Amino acid sequence: MAGRLPREFIDDLIARIDIVDLIDARVPLKKSGSSFLARCPFHSEKTPSFSVSREKQFYHCFGCGAHGNAISFLMDYEHQSFPEALETLATLAGIDLPKAMATPGANPSASLQPVYDILERAAGFYIQQLRDHPDAEQAKIYLRKRGLTGEIARRYRLGYAPPGWNSLPADWPRTLLIQSGLVIEKGRSCYDRFRHRIMFPIRDRRGRVIGFGGRTLGDDTPKYLNSPETEVFRKGKELYGLHELLESTPRPRRILVVEGYLDVIALAQHGINDAVATLGTSTSAEHVHLLFRFTREIVFCFDGDAAGHKAAWRALEASLPLLQEGREIRFIHLPAGEDPDSLIRKEGREAFERRIGQASPFSDYLFRTLQTDLDLRSIEGRATLQKQARELLDRLPVGAFRTLMEQRLSELTGVVTQAPASKSLENRLGHPSGQVRPPSAWRNVVTLLLHRPQLAKLISPEIRARLIGNPRAGPLIARILEYTDLRDTPTAGMLFEHLRETPEGELARNLLKPGLLTPEEGMEREFVDALDRVRALLRDERLSQLIDKSKVAQLTDSEREELRKLTGGKS
């Protein structure tokens, strides 16, 4: 989206928004010196470490490393997409979005609004049918037998699809009914997809109805029927109940993943409001990534049969690339023949919570499952475990969690493996990994530029060329200077947005993550000092090159003159 929008528009939009006002309306801020502080909205903490700078138009948490500009905050805190965040800020700023976002295809949300509207009307229609249709009594009896109250039915907007083939209003646009998946087109006629079913509206994170699930009340198959994939509904990317969960608890301590709509609703009826369900698909990496945006702990809850164990293992494999320090995944299997709906009605909330508390950690579950049918007393058994586990652990991100998992594998098999070397940030910007040293001069220059782009005006043409020529930091510095050359008063927030989709963006985000303790009034002095240190490093590097060359070859006249100057005039 950013590629299709004029860069000037995004700069102007960020310049018109005061990030302090934007965040303070959602997270109360308290002035502290030149910045504003709050308890971080992205992790639990007792002492405020979330800092917002009006001058930089930037926020940073010194606890968890969360950082960004106004657009990033809306995307992370309110879970808006990039286009949605731009729409929100444009509305606050009182400016119109450029035509690039108003044309079909450039802004899917706008062009698909009629589809969202027809799905919302359908949800209202099904709710009315549950209340008024004479055939809905069977649905009401079914829901009452499961202990569901009117309050919980309203919260999840439960409805009823009548048994007829053409129950939806005849004056609704046929093309929209087909496009939304509400009806099935057959030849020249259409008929309702959902008939004589309890209806479960599926909502996206903004609360918009994007599809439906229907539970049959007769002998029709399948027992559960979902909307087909449409332009607004992607089963592999959505989770039933996530909107309702976030509406009541924006930052849940944990999220429980179950298998069915009624499991989610039954748990909520008994006070467990943090459950979601996949939509008839296996848990995907996209699901796990989505959940970790809102919580640090995911508990997968599956049936105890073979299918439940298979589903749990697929969830484990999908989670591997996303597991790192600070994130936790656990697994629970219910007794044979039980699901969350039946078990919580039988045992009650406290007993079910105890089961969740006893869920197996990811590490235990992985190694225990792999050891099934293996004899670790034998070389063959240990070798098999080593091979199978190694293939899985190689998919974990490099870090402490992976290292500890590898240590556990070594304890089980006796095979000691060399941990993979990570391409650390320090290596990329000029310091050896593993050494406790002050930040390098190169790192200081780049980090200070990211926090206060106006410092670029202090860079002389001579040192500028040398900075850009550095193989490690040069590409990012060039990108920063390319931007600041075109702006009179660039802020950190504006520069952050400029770098978002660039190849250098990841390096910039990693540099910003630790934060900057230098006070605003000390930044210019520190930047000048860092430039002086870089200049000295470059001088020493060039001096070494010339001396080394002089030992094996004749220097040119210009090189001899350069060497003389570098050595203080000595010949």
Image: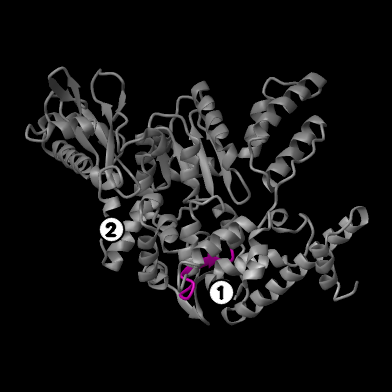
Location of the C terminus (image quadrant): bottom right
| Distance from the alpha carbon under mark 1 to that under mark 2 | 32 Å
Specify start and end residues of the magenta stretch as a single range. 53-63
Residue 74, image x, y percentages:
40, 59
Label number found at residue 530: none
Alpha-carbon neighbours of circle 1 within 10 Å: few (<14), some, or many (≥20)?
few
Q: Which residue is mark 1?
A: 457
Q: Are marks 1 and 2 in contact (CB under 8 Å)?
A: no
Residue most extreme to the right: 551
Amino acid found under the numbered disc labelled 1: Lys
Q: Position of residue 471 (x, y in %)?
A: 68, 54
Q: Is residue 85 above or below residue 60?
A: above
Residue 133 is drawn in which quadrant? top left
Judge depth for marks 1 and 2 and give the one in front: 1
Q: Residue at x 11, y 29 (%)?
A: 167
SS assignment at label 2: loop
Q: Residue at x 39, y 39 (%)?
A: 239
In the rendering, at what x and y percent does residue 432 appear? 78, 56
The crowd level at tag 2 (other Cα within 10 Å; few <14, some 14-19, many 20+) is some
The residue tagged with tag 1: helix, strand or loop?
A: helix
Residue 97: image tag: 2
